[in-house]
Image (cartoon, rainbow, N blue to C red):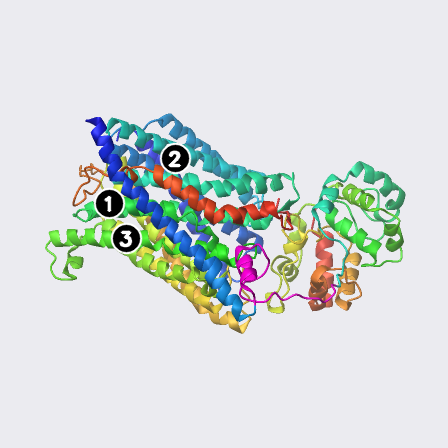
């Protein structure tokens, strides 16, 4: 491990501390929106809490986790020291300073703009500047990942980059592209407005720039889960990866199809022509290709493992899989949630169907199920898989780990399936409380209570997760050495440059972004629309 | 040898470059043909929109849906206030100078509203620490006749627009109003509930949603704090009866009409006492 344990653990613990706090806030929010908690707390407190919950989950948990995992992968998969470790620590502390700058204004009630900002609302400038620092810290991480891969390639000419590292670099490259949109929005629009330099914001332009980031950021969060599917899970199940090439293709397709698709978040926005929305929706549909490739490849890999363990027949191998191992269990649970969430996402991506569920709890349910469910359950699996290597200690029994994963799965399903249903009933999102005296809203009450129960189960699972990681630091059992990454059935000996780097794909992304976003952004300059008054919350 | 492996790698790579590009641009091209040409033209035809207009609308070059005729409303607007928050006006407010406003305030306003914005008589509102936009809006409404008062109408008409902004800035710069949790704790719970949470069963939003600094309500919403009780009672009653009608979208007329006389008194007492 060559001394990056402290670096990785520092990132992971910050991520999981933010996660735990955000789980408490989430449970409280569900309580105050339920019939039991009606009229507890003020709308101001509710929106403050939602902002803190969203920022902690979407920016702190994810960014720190991904950075920590990236450093881990760079060292373990390439088998060489991390280049620029000092810079990694600089980036870490920069991001920590950023997080503090973000959280203080939120707690002071000067930044209740939710984690997606909603200009022309503006928060305290510190809130945005702190976020920029977090992003700059993550850019340093991106550069370190690129440098690590380049140095390895120089030392191993013609060799295929290990899949885990290739995927991590794909994520870093994608993140550099992704953050351009939000960085432009913050630096040129929101921060000047927040500082009082300008009095108006073109909300349409701001929303367009944010949409550039909004879908790809979700894939930034998702890719570690996919890295685990391809590189950790087949080994944990005792099998091999069915196809290394499928893995490479998947990550490349995520890079390409995560970016020119963000306008499907703007289907109800009037500032763009329907044609542009159609083009980006069509490109969004192709995101299903890497998802289905993955479902196929990982299922095939698990089938290999099941048959190696003596499974017979069409489905007999499933029962033979080592479900008692957390990584295998988490994969099964993640696939179930990905299935429900994915089909829900198809509704969101249909222009007419989206109109029915737009701004309802359906959407909240969708992103909690996909991100909070499938992705976060794999974050747990990754943490369980690599924690013994980071601490040098082993768990006495995997039972509490399995309990925690099951609780998370049950909690997430019990919370989000009623939300989907309530969304179809028209329950709106982003509101602080409901008037349960209204007979229509009163009928939602029982389902809101069911989802509250799911939220409490999630909170219990979050506490158990942190406990599981914490006790490992004191476990008396020393770690038993075992390989971490799965071998492919046919390990690659030589791959085309296109599957071993990102030059070609960066060119294609650039052209696609110009085609998909060129005119939609240029129109705001060609014919400026009436700008909205800045609405200061500080 | 190195040369051979490089050319081998190049040969291995070439089909990827070609087919990846063909696939990607094939997808984009089909998106353009379907989304910008076929769908808009076919949908537009069903509502009598010609192909050119439909394509321009799909691209966003012309306004409106490519599938439906553009509905235009020709009813003349009847705004309750002439104030429009344009970037120019916001810039005037941002550049207003309290020092310039002080001289005019000394000359015109202090007799009723006090030198520091603390009024001499209960029927006149305190202006200290009030939002500049709120003061400007009311002065402008007096000027244009959207709101009337036997004294204020003539006074406001005598002032030009930049002076209104300066006077507003002067009073806005007077000592701020801050929450005082001790005095607030003495308010009746039902009134605090109305302020903080409103009454959803009567569709009454919380007062604090608009009338607290940084609450995020409309820019012209005045900050309510340490305000004269008689003044608030009178304004709520004027709104309730519809006699005062310079509130955009009739927000305050709608809310005030739903309040009971007891609630009006309670809220006025809350906003008289609860601060600093």
Image quadrant in which the N terminus of chain A is located: top left
Subunit that carries the residue with mark 2 = A
Examine the image and state in which quarter residue B94 appears.
top right
Of pointers 2 and 1, the one earlier in the residue sequence = 2
Q: Position of residue A363 (x, y in %)?
A: 45, 59
Residue in the image at 77% along x and 45% along y: B128
Disc 1 is placed on an element classified as helix
* A391 on left or right of B110: left
Q: Which residue is mark 3?
A: A293
Q: Nearer the viewer, residue A2 or A261?
A: A261
> Residue A324, can we see it?
no
- Find residue A245 and name its label: 1
Of pointers 2 and 3, the one earlier in the residue sequence = 2
Q: Position of residue A39 (x, y in %)?
A: 55, 61
Residue in the image at 39% along x and 61% along y: A346
Q: Residues within 10 Å of mark 2 (few under 14, many from 20)?
A: many
Q: Eyeballing the image, is B150 above or below A107? A: below
Q: Are marks 2 and 1 on the same chain?
A: yes
Q: Are marks 3 and 1 on the same chain?
A: yes
């Amino acid at each position: 491990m060559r001394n990056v344990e402290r670096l990785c653990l520092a990132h992971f613990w910050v991520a999981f501390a933010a996660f735990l706090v955000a789980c408490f806030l989430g449970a409280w929010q569900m309580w105050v929106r339920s019939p039991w908690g009606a009229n507890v707390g003020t709308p101001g407190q509710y929106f403050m809490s939602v902002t803190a919950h969203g920022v902690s989950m979407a920016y702190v948990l994810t960014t720190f986790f991904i950075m920590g995992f990236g450093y881990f992968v760079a060292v373990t998969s390439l088998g060489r020291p991390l280049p620029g470790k000092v810079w990694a620590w600089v980036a870490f502390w920069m991001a920590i300073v950023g997080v503090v700058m973000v959280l203080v204004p939120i707690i002071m009630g000067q930044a209740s703009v939710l984690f997606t900002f909603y200009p022309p609302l503006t928060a305290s400038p510190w809130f945005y500047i702190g976020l920029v620092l977090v992003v700059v810290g993550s850019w340093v991480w991106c550069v370190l990942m690129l440098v690590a891969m380049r140095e390895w390639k120089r030392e191993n000419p013609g060799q295929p980059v290990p899949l885990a590292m290739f995927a991590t670099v794909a994520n870093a490259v994608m993140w550099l592209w992704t953050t351009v949109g939000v960085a432009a929005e913050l630096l040129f629009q929101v921060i000047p407005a927040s500082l009082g330099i300008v009095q108006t914001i073109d909300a349409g332009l701001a929303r367009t720039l944010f949409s550039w980031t909004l879908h790809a950021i979700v894939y930034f969060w998702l890719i570690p889960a996919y890295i685990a599917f391809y590189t950790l899970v087949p080994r944990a199940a005792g099998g091999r990866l069915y196809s290394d090439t499928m893995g490479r293709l998947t990550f490349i397709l995520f890079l390409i199809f995560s970016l020119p698709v963000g306008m499907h978040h703007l289907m109800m926005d009037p500032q763009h022509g329907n044609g542009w929305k159609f083009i980006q929706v069509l490109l969004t549909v192709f995101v299903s290709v890497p998802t289905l490739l993955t479902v196929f490849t990982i299922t095939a890999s698990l089938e290999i493992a099941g048959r190696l363990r003596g499974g017979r027949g069409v489905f007999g191998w499933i029962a033979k899989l080592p479900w008692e191992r957390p990584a295998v269990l988490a994969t099964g649970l993640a696939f179930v949630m990905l299935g429900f969430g994915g089909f829900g996402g198809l509704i969101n991506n249909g222009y007419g169907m989206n109109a029915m569920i737009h701004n309802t709890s359906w959407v909240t349910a969708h992103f909690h199920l996909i991100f909070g469910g499938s992705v976060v359950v794999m974050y747990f699996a990754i943490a369980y898989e690599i924690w013994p290597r980071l601490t040098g200690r082993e768990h006495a029994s995997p039972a509490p780990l399995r309990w925690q994963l099951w609780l998370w799965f049950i909690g997430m399903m019990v919370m989000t399936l009623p939300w989907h249903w309530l969304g179809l009933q028209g329950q709106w999102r982003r509101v602080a409380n409901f008037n349960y005296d209204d007979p229509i809203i009163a009928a939602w009450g029982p389902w809101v209570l069911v989802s509250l129960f799911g939220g409490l189960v999630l909170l219990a699972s979050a506490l158990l997760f942190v406990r599981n990681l914490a006790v490992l630091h004191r476990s008396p059992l020393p770690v038993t050495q075992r390989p971490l990454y799965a071998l492919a059935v046919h390990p690659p000996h030589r791959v085309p440059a296109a599957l071993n780097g990102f030059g070609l794909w960066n060119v294609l992304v650039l052209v696609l972004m110009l085609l998909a976003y060129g005119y939609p952004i240029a129109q705001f300059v060609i014919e400026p629309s009436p700008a909205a008054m800045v609405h200061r919350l500080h | 040898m190195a040369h051979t492996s490089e050319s081998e790698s190049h040969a291995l790579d070439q089909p990827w470059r070609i087919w990846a590009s063909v696939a990607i641009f094939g997808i984009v091209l089909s998106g353009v043909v379907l989304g910008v040409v076929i769908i808009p033209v076919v949908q537009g035809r069903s509502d009598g929109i010609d192909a050119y207009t439909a394509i321009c609308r799909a691209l966003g070059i012309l306004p409106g849906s490519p599938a439906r005729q553009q509905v235009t409303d020709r009813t003349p607007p009847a705004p309750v206030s002439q104030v429009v928050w344009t970037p120019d006006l916001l810039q005037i407010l941002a550049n207003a100078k309290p020092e310039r406003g002080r001289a005019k305030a000394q000359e015109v306003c202090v007799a009723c509203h006090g030198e520091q914005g603390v009024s001499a008589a209960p029927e006149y509102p305190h202006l200290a620490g009030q939002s500049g936009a709120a003061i400007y809006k009311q002065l402008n409404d007096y000027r244009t006749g959207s709101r009337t008062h036997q004294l204020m109408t003539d006074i406001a008409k005598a002032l030009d627009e930049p002076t209104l902004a300066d006077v507003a800035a002067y009073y806005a710069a007077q000592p701020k109003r801050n929450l005082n949790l001790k005095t607030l704790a003495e308010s009746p719970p039902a009134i605090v509930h109305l302020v903080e949470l409103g009454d959803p069963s009567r569709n009454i939003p919380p007062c604090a949603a608009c009338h607290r600094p940084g609450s995020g309500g409309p820019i012209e919403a005045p900050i309510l704090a340490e305000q004269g009780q008689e003044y608030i009672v009178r304004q709520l009653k004027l709104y309730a009866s519809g006699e005062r009608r310079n509130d955009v979208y009739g927000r305050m007329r709608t809310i005030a009409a739903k309040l009971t006389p007891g609630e009006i008194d309670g809220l006025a007492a809350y906003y008289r006492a609860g601060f600093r």
